[in-house]
Amino acid sequence: MTSPFSAESLYGVASIAPSMGTAAPTQAMGVDSSDSGVGWLINPHNPLMWFGLFLLATVGAAGVAGSVRLGPAKVGGSVGKA
Amino acid sequence: MAKTQSPVQFIQGVQSPNMVINPAVFYAATRRMRFPVKSATAISGLGSSDPVEIRKTGILSALVVRVTGTVAVATADPTAWLYDYPYNIVKEFRLSANGQSNLQSARGITIRAHELSTNPKLNDRGVSRYYAGAAKTQGTMALDSDVWGDASGDPNPGASSGAHAPTTYTVDLSYVIPVAADPKYLVGALFGQSSATNINLEIVWNTEAALVTVGSAALTWALTYAVDAVAYSIPQVGGQFVVPDLTQFHQLTEFRQGGLTANDNEIKLPGTGVGRKLLRMIFQVSRTSTYAGNPLAVNATNYNKVAWAYGGNDSPETWANGTRLAQQNERETGCHLGKLWGIGLIDFASEFALRDAIDMAATSDLRVILGLAASPTAGYAQVAQEVLAATAVGA
């Protein structure tokens, strides 16, 4: 309301019209990439990664197997000791 | 084909026909109306109250109340008149509208002081009245058309009328209830043009014991009251109804604060918050727990400081003593408000409201500081705050 006779103009009261279009966006928050997320797990500086590789070499990866049947045809595959 | 209806609109919380807010067009096209909403009627009695429903018409700007009648003193028994007489015959004017209770809640003397502070054409012009038994020509806050204390022995506050009894005395007072904060631009006026509107004025009458200490003979009161409304029609321009800016409610509310001591009394204003603008503060300190003692005159003897403050200790305005504030008030109102009736006024709106009015959203713990030179005996302060408060979106 910009009328010179409005309460806003005469008394300086805040306009009560909704003003969502002019609302300030939430400020982008800073993200520390090295200190959060899965990137930290595969970091070569992380001793847990080397421990994981050691387990993989000594115990072996878990096997994965599966098959899909589409009518008379059957497609299957396996990785490791399935 | 189905009949279509215009969309529902709300103004000040009540359903209304579709209207356009355009103050400039409204002023040019509206018609000022003045009509009685209550013809002269006997009051229900001192200590009681009379509710008045205001007619549902137009944009309500003000209510004018007249209280008149007689009080008969039967014998020559001494009768001591107290300082609630005559203005506080009305202990409280309560105005409520559309579910907004207590838009106005103030004593008669506060309404009169407010009128003197807002109407630039009005001051007490040296109207002579008897006060505490002596003729006073300054600070009476009286209109010449008021009838009280016209002669020695007439009922006047702080005096005995026993010497002149038995006599029947006339009382005549008028009050302007400021429904709108601004009678010119109608900011704060009430939207009355709806069957859903419900505007009520309740007039609470003071008790006889607060007005007068009666001797052995009873007094006979015969008071009447009448109420006129000042309202503006809602014009139709270019096929549309036009109204002024009705986004604000106008409040003049008063509260009592006891426990006053010598030196700084920091009295917090209740109800501060976002969407509220403080226009004025009016205060008065009574020396005693009742109104038997005369109000504390606003001068350097009684007040060693007057200020307002907020937050930790932000104090934008300070008056070094009561006299300094009273001098300013006399310049602002043309009336020595603090001389007899002890009224103090801190006015943020009369000079330039846009600049000076206090945004109550940014002034937490807003308070008035009354520095009293001496502790009043069980005295108390009456503090009134005049506020513009935002209504709901839709107006």
Image (tube, rainbow, N blue to C red):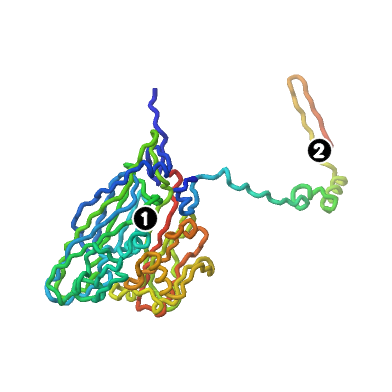
Quarter of the figure with the N terminus of chain B: top left
* Residue B367 point in image, percent of width and height: 46, 67
Query: Where is A17 relative to B280, above or below?
Result: above
Label 1 resides on the chain identified as B
* Residue B303 point in image, percent of width and height: 41, 76
In this rendering, would A22 be left or right of B22?
A: right
- Residues at circles 1 and 2 in contact by the CB criterion of under 8 Å: no
Q: Would you identify the image quadrant in which residue B338 lies?
A: bottom left
Q: Would you identify the image quadrant in which residue B240 lies?
A: top left
**Residue at left 40%, top 60%?**
B386
For mark 1, what is the residue?
A: B103
Q: Would you identify the image quadrant in which residue B122 lies?
A: bottom left
Residue A69 showing in the rendered view: yes
Image disc number at residue A63: 2
Same chain? Circles 1 and 2: no
**Residue at left 12%, top 72%?**
B166
* Residue B255 point in image, percent of width and height: 37, 65
Quarter of the figure with the C terminus of chain B: top left
Image disc number at residue B242: none
